[in-house]
Image (spheres, rainbow, N blue to C red):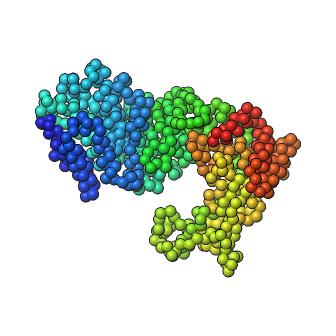
Amino acid sequence: MNINNYIEFLGKNKLELINHYVNSFLDKNIKNHINEIISNIIKIYTKHITLEKRIEFYDLGKIYEKIIPYEKRKLSGEIYTPKSTVDYILDKIEYIPYESIENKKIIDLSCGSGSFILEAIKRYIERYHILYKVNDIIKLDANILKNIIKNLKKNIIGVDINPIACIICQINIYLILYNIFNKILESEYDYCIPIFDIYNKNSLRISKKNEYDFIVGNPPYLFIRDIPKNQRTIIKNQEFETNIGQYDYFQIFIELGIKLLKDKGYLGYIVPDSLLALSNRAPIRNYVKNTTKIIEIFYTGPKFENSVVSNIIIIFQKEKEESMRNNNKIHINIANSKFENPHKIIQTELENWDNQFLIHLNFKDNIILNHLIDHFPKVKNLIEEDRFKIELNRGVELSKEGLVFYCNTCQKYYPLPKNKENCRICGERFTEDQTEKIILDKPPIREISDYKPYIYSLKRYKIKTYKYINMKKKGIQYKNLDNYKNRIIIRQINQNNLICASYDNDLSLCSQSFYNLKVIDSPIKEFDNLFLLGLINSHLLSYFFMKSFGSYKKLFPRILIEKIKFLPIKIPENKNEKIKAQRIRSNVKILLDLDDQSKQQQKIQKLINYEIYDLYQIENSNREYIEQYFKMT
């Protein structure tokens, strides 16, 4: 083959490439996309610029990104990885030229156009610079270069479900290796340029366990409802251990990656930070803790275009020995943090937090939180305890605005679904004239008996806005009206980085974005709704919530009902504690009756905080630490 026609080879053989990757895809549009991509690639080389400049500056992945809109790529989890992230992960798993990587296997299970694959190849080639003590690979003999290519093909592997991405990755590899092929072809004209192992297949079907030294990548982020049905079936049939409840595709890729690793092999991924503490991710956290040493967790924040997801980089090493896993020290890195963070966490300590990965806790945090966990019952414990009668529930299963539609087939009203025009029960399409709003500023005079007060917005200790909700819509889950009397209302969204709760003695409904907590019966008269509201709104419990469920984030996390159940609650038992509880109740009542006077509120809240620190036996230095924490947030 004439080396001057090497790039032309790619163009002339595009049908061979298409057949190789797309033989099971008959969709004309897919083939048209592939043709367009390859045609654009060939056009690059008609310009009068040097080959080195073409290779150095032109990113073929950009062609694909222009052809396929972001929203379409997002639906299939195809968001490509920044080079800085690729470099960081490869460095951390020690896939570097100064290590013996020449005979070790690395695979990217969702390789896309080749971000990880291409950088791995560059490092692989540089490894031979070191082995043969040359500063340019093409100074080596052609036979040595052929063996390098042979080993490279055997040891660097990519997989992607998208045929277009696979072709771009394959061509990107050809461009990186151009000079090597050039040298080989000068002495061996008939040398057959290989097709590299970039497999167009579903990674879930890979069955070779304990095969790879390194697993890397940016797995797809798809919630269970967005995973295609056929792929959910594959997940079910492959006997994964972490596809429990409301799982995400990326956690399946973590489990798959660990299974494919050799013992002592490394996995490096960038994934959503929901892995750290979200209750739905508990199965994958347990799997990771029981199969690997967690080498590093790096909270990076958002890393991708148009991203609403905050990310972490995870580095795991597969480890069979339990003692090695338990005694492992996890390195923590939090980007742009203004708080003091621990350098290491002992892996066995994760068990203290229901195996959540609370990466933001330092030594003092651990002391305070362990004290609260070890010495005080949780809300869920009190709900289950016979001597108390306590209830916690959501509001009406309805959006805050109260938009509903009437389904003619079901003959019922349902909350209006987002971005859909079909009934989720029967599938019937509904029209705009079937929708209405059942929450109003004022009820119609003729229908006033059909409406009840509805909490529309609240602040700490203060219900800000009432509206009215129509109670006569069959199908709407209003729930038991007793839930909405004489209770604490907790808002999902914080107020100034503090839990936001208030109290209403009268009947007033609320949406599912508010939670109703009430003490119905208590053997201790001081332990009632007013006292409990004081605890919920205290700095201590807001600190506990933030540190337990998400202070690695830039924003205070949503207060979910499951997390409320884990708040530690002090029951006043002796005479001194009951006196303090009475003072807390009295000050809470003042705040509930107080007009919006911020200085007076702050003064009273400070008194409440002081009493609560005493009740929970928080040392003075730790009180100062908590108060300083809120000054910094």
Q: Is residue 583 visible?
A: yes
Question: Between 124 and 423, which is closer to the camera in this rendering?
Answer: 124
Look at the picture and state if 123 lies above or below 226: above
* Residue at the image position 81 percent from the left and 47 percent from the top: 584
* Residue at the image position 21 percent from the left and 29 percent from the top: 146
Question: Between 80 and 388, which is closer to the camera in this rendering?
Answer: 80
* Residue at the image position 60 percent from the left and 35 percent from the top: 339
Look at the picture and state if 594 lies above or below 93: below
Q: Is residue 459 left or right of residue 40?
A: right
Q: Is residue 196 visible?
A: no
* Residue 437 image point, x, y percent: 58, 71
* Residue at the image position 40 percent from the left and 47 percent from the top: 79
* Residue 261 image point, x, y percent: 40, 34
Q: Is residue 519 left or right of residue 498?
A: right
* Residue 83 image point, x, y percent: 38, 37
Question: Between 95 and 176, which is closer to the camera in this rendering?
Answer: 176
Image quarter where the N terminus lies is top left
In the image, farthest residue toward the bottom: 446
Look at the picture and state if 258 lies above or below 98: below
Q: How many marks?
A: 0
Q: Is residue 357 left or right of residue 212?
A: right
Look at the picture and state if 540 lies above or below 66: above
In the image, farthest residue toward the right: 575
Image quarter where the C terminus lies is top right
* Residue 580 image point, x, y percent: 83, 44
